[in-house]
């Protein structure tokens, strides 16, 4: 995962959520089909993709997929 487009594709393809680059700034609760299990799955996917542990407390406070991306890309 090198770009935000890679991140969007990962979320869409691996989690099966209909997200686009245009709606990743939306609140997580406003995303169709989103639930807390998706966040746990996404964290596991991102750790696999990046090869490193991600900051769990900050991820659990994320309010959008864009926020999650920024934390994973940092």
Image (spheres, helix red, strand yellow):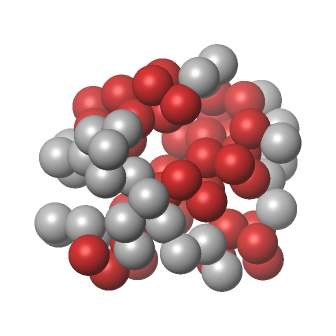
> In the figure, 40 relative to 11: above or below?
below
> In the figure, 30 relative to 67: above or below?
below
Task: Tell me the quadrant of the picture where the N terminus can be found.
Answer: top right
Looking at the image, residue 44 sits to the left or right of residue 73; the answer is: left
Residue 19, percent from left and from top: 26, 46
Q: Which is more toward the observer, 58 or 47? A: 58
Taking the spot 49% from the left edge, 66% from the top edge, the residue there is 64
Q: Residue furthest top?
A: 2
Looking at the image, residue 21 sits to the left or right of residue 2; the answer is: left
Question: Residue 16: which quarter of the image?
Answer: top left
Looking at the image, residue 56 sits to the left or right of residue 60; the answer is: right
Q: Which is more toward the observer, 47 or 6? A: 6
Task: Tell me the quadrant of the picture where the C terminus can be found.
Answer: top right
Can residue 12 be seen by looking at this rendering?
A: yes
How many labels, in total?
A: 0
Taking the spot 61% from the left edge, 47% from the top edge, the residue there is 69
Residue 57, percent from left and from top: 78, 77
Can residue 43 be seen by looking at this rendering?
A: no
> In the figure, 66 relative to 51: above or below?
below
Residue 54, percent from left and from top: 78, 53
Q: Residue furthest front?
A: 22
Question: Residue 36: which quarter of the image?
Answer: bottom left
Q: Which is more toward the observer, 31 or 23? A: 23
Residue 39, percent from left and from top: 48, 65
Question: Residue 29: which quarter of the image?
Answer: bottom left
């Amino acid at each position: 995962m090198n770009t935000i487009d890679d991140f969007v594709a990962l979320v869409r393809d691996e989690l099966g959520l209909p997200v686009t680059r245009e709606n990743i700034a939306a609140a997580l609760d406003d995303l169709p089909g989103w639930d807390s299990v998706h966040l746990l799955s996404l964290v596991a996917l991102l750790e696999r993709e990046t090869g490193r542990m991600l900051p769990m407390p900050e991820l659990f406070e994320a309010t959008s997929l864009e926020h999650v991306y920024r934390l994973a890309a940092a």
